[in-house]
Amino acid sequence: DIVMTQTPLSSPVTLGQPASISCRSSQSLVHSDGNTYLSWLQQRPGQPPRLLIYKISNRFSGVPDRFSGSGAGTDFTLKISRVDAEDVGIYYCMQATQFPWTFGQGTKVEIK
Amino acid sequence: QVQLQQWGAGLLKPSETLSLTCGVYGGSFSGYYWSWIRRPPGKGLQWIGKITHTGSTNYNPSLKSRVTISVDTSKNQFSLKLTSVTAADTAVYYCARGAGIFGELISRWGQGTLVTVSS
């Protein structure tokens, strides 16, 4: 299985300040079709996860533009340009390049 | 707008079979991939498997011997069965809809069902 490792596991941030989460995969996520199936999901307390970013850097419909994704190969980053109170929750990276699909351990974003 | 509503038993004894169903309302059933994903307490998400509307499945090898995902297109429902459960299967279970080439755009989720395995 591809192991997804996120850092940090906890990220206390000040409202209005940026936040960054790193995700590293144990092997390249470049698929044989040339795409990289790396997504980011957000899970707010008491809610199901929500898709934020797919294929590294594509924002899903309705996702604020303060969220951005970048990276390639085995190293990926989710950035929040200015953290809002509604951004509190756990963030997961997920790979769908190879079965079984796997997730990172999750990064908890909280307000200082 | 499509909604996923799931139901099933929330308390099981060890060795029993977990059975959950997810109904899809207000949207097309064909053309998407239908997944089950779980989150054990204090842990991250684990993908269990997925199915197409035609019944083609992919399972997580770590659970494959115990998992069956099935689909009933006449009712716009899909189901999860997990046999011989243990305490390690205690988790919140989510059904979800995926789009994209492989169903990797998991963009619609059920509300989640807490399943507790305890003697």
Image: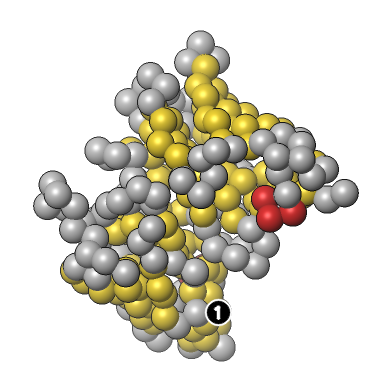
Question: Quick one: A74 or A60, which is closer to the camera?
Answer: A74
Circle 1 Cα neighbour tier, 10 Å, few/some/many (<14 / 14–19 / ≥20): some
Q: Position of residue B22 (x, y in %)?
A: 58, 30
Q: Position of residue B5 (x, y in %)?
A: 60, 33
Q: Determine if residue A82 is in view.
A: no
Left or right: B58 with respect to A49? left
At horizontal 19% and vertical 52% (from top left) the residue drawn is A31
Left or right: A4 with respect to B102? right
Q: Position of residue A56 (x, y in %)?
A: 24, 62
Rendered position, B25 above or below A32:
above
Q: Quadrant of the N terminus of chain B?
A: top left
At horizontal 53% and vertical 75% (from top left) the residue drawn is A108
Left or right: A56 with respect to B96? left
* Farthest-out residue, left: A34
At horizontal 29% and vertical 59% (from top left) the residue drawn is A38
Q: Position of residue A12 (x, y in %)?
A: 52, 86
Label 1: state its secondary structure: strand
Rendered position, A41 above or below B109:
below
* Farthest-out residue, top: B74
Left or right: B28 with respect to A68? right
What residue would you read off at disc 1?
A: A110
* Farthest-out residue, right: B119
Which of the chains bears the disc numbered 1? A
At horizontal 54% and vertical 69% (from top left) the residue drawn is A89
Rendered position, B107 above or below B16:
below
The amino acid at mark 1 is: Glu
